[in-house]
Image: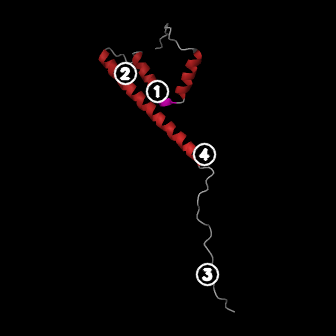
Amino acid sequence: MVHQSSDSHEMPCAEAAKLAQRLHQHPRLRMKVEQLLAVVENEGELTRANAAEQRVIESIQKLGQAALQSWAEQQNQQQTQALLENTRGIHRARQKNSIGTRDSVPSQS
């Protein structure tokens, strides 16, 4: 059930499209926001305020957990990329492929 708002707080189309794109890049966050909206829109047919309050609290906690998980993954990816870029020119010390020089064996002439 989608409600049309007549508020003066409506988001311009460009901002709404940008938000939709950003949420698309973070599917876990998008799912949690949708769950929160379901509570607000009373899709679960909650009839008591304390049940609705509890559902909102749980939804916001899960949204926060998903946001922090996404943040941590992004930080890890950025740090890994920076490390790779910083170490590109460094040559690693490698073990020689040679087995060494042969021992001198007296000729049998």
Q: Amino acid at mark 1?
A: Met
Q: Secondary structure at mark 4?
A: helix
Residue closer to the observer: 91 or 48: 91
Q: Secondary structure at mark 3?
A: loop
Q: Earlier in the sequence, mark 2 or mark 3?
A: 2
Discs 4/2, front: 4
Query: Looking at the rendered structure, which numbered label has been put on residue 85?
Result: 4
Mark 2 to mark 1: distance in Å?
14 Å
Discs 4/3, front: 4
Q: Position of residue 28 (x, y in %)?
A: 47, 30
Quarter location, residue 22: top right
Discs 2/3, front: 3
Q: Earlier in the sequence, mark 2 or mark 1?
A: 1
Mark 1 to mark 4: distance in Å?
34 Å
**Mark 4 burial class by Cα count in 10 Å: few <14, some 14-19, many 20+:** few
In the rendered structure, the answer to whether residue 56 lies left or right of residue 18 reads left
In the rendered structure, the answer to whether residue 51 lies left or right of residue 69 reads left
Q: Earlier in the sequence, mark 1 or mark 3?
A: 1
Query: Looking at the rendered structure, which numbered label has been put on residue 103?
Result: 3
Q: Is residue 65 magenta?
A: no
The residue positioned 43% from the left and 19% from the top of the image is: 37
The residue where tag 2 is placed is 56
Q: Amino acid at mark 2?
A: Val
